[in-house]
Amino acid sequence: MKNYPRQSKDITALIRPQVRKLAAYHVDETKVRIKLDAMENPFPLPPAMRSEIAAAVKNSFINLYPDPSAKELKKAIASFWKMKPEQMILGNGSDELIQAIILAFGGPVLVPTPTFAMYDITAQALAQEVVTVPLNAAFELDADLMIKKAKTSKAKVIFLACPNNPTGNRFSDAAIKRILDKANAAVVIDEAYYSFSGKSYLSLLKSYPNMIILRTLSKIGFAGLRVGALVASPGIVQELNKIRLPYNINSLSQTVAGCALKHREILNQQISLLISERKKLYNELSNLAGVTVYPSETNFIMIRTLADASAIHKELKQKGILIKNLNKPGPLKNCLRVTIGTPEENKEFLMTLNRILATQ
Ligand code: PMP
């Protein structure tokens, strides 16, 4: 028998080419004073709620596997968002549900651009073709072009983030309904920012068996728990459940999220405050020379600067304020995205941005 050669080859060459050519989803891990880059809720939970959570955690059995279908948490989320638990699947963040959808349906995956990067990254990682359709200058959907591209490419899934990330706007109802009506594909309406827009397509689920709704707890205060929810027709839910990893929601996330969702009034208060802060920041940013502000129905605002956005981003970071730099050639040239923080954080961001702009 021939000796197996000592490893001299680059073993990463065996990794699928689609994976090797991918760029990882970039997360800036710089430690900063004011973190406004990732659409997190900036408010910590009130002490009484934290004590209640601590007591619940104390009583959990982490030596055992969690409830595989997260029944109690599903019920809590269903009651929080008025959903039917039997039509739901929970994911380790909605990111995991995006992956499950693409795994189940395969590609081509049709997305408008610019939109949330993980649709494209996940499709590529799973070796599925991605077909893109540009949004117009106001970042609105071109429904006819989407439908045409869906037909010619034989797309299996269409992702529509509504409101959209990173632009912040909600696509028109008419465009979404036309796509739901005409495209022979699963249409995923990603409502990650639903709480800040108040507008949902959930009630259309019974009329459109090809529709899948995604939500997440990440933006309303629980990004650290990694809990996302999917709602769809029973047929889709049954198929997706076959590929969902067992025990995908860990016990601590199940316990803590279940406990936190009982405090609807506290969460709603925080959301209302963030919405009013968004309106305030929008008006203040609109008054700055050299800045175009885009309307937002989310917990972030996108702006475009006349001066070099990357330089502004860098200076803000040097001063301890991290926002997201979207600047690259194309529709997001000189664009930046700022998450709505606490009133103090927003004030300091605005003041610092103002100072930086004055020196450009
Ligand atoms: N969808 C959209 C539109 C998003 O912006 C994000 C987060 N940036 C997600 C899904 C993923 O959220 P999570 O995995 O935290 O639930």
Image (spheres, rainbow, N blue to C red):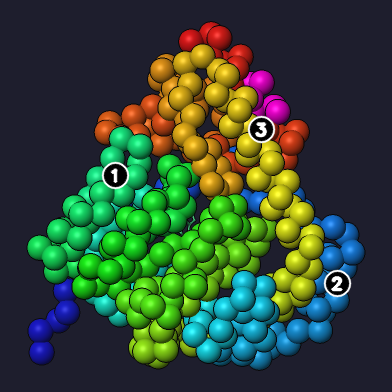
Question: What secondary structure is found at the residue carrying circle 2?
Answer: helix
Q: Measure how far apart labels 3 and 2 are at the Cα level.
A: 34 Å
Tell me the quarter of the picture where residue 30 sits.
Answer: top right
Q: Measure how far apart labels 1 and 3 are at the Cα level.
A: 27 Å
Residue bounds of the magenta highlight: 347-352
Q: Measure how far apart labels 2 and 1 are at the Cα level.
A: 45 Å
Q: Is residue 321 above or below residue 79?
A: above
Q: Give the residue drawn at x 81%, y 84%.
A: 59
Q: Give the residue drawn at x 53%, y 38%.
A: 301
Residue indicated by mark 1: 135
Counting residues from the start of the chain, the first of labels 1 and 3 encountered is: 1
Counting residues from the start of the chain, the first of labels 3 and 2 encountered is: 2
Q: Name which residue type carries label 3.
A: Lys
The mark lying in front, picked from 2 and 1, is 1
Q: Main secondary structure of the magenta part?
A: helix
Q: How many marks?
A: 3
Which label is found at residue 52?
A: 2
Q: Name which residue type carries label 2.
A: Glu
Q: Give the residue drawn at x 44%, y 72%.
A: 204
Disc 3 + disc 2, Cβ < 8 Å: no
Mark yes or no: residue 34 visible. Answer: no
Indicate whether residue 351 is drawn in magenta.
Answer: yes
Q: Give the residue drawn at x 43%, y 76%.
A: 205
Tell me the quarter of the picture where residue 329 sits.
Answer: top left
State whether label 1 is within 8 Å of ligand 1: no
For residue 97, side relative to residue 343 (left or right):
left
Name the quarter where the N terminus is drawn.
bottom left
Which label is found at residue 280?
A: 3
**In the foreground, 303 or 187:** 187
Tell me the quarter of the picture where residue 184 sits.
Answer: bottom left
Q: Residue 100 location in percent, x, y?
A: 37, 76
Q: Name which residue type carries label 1.
A: Leu
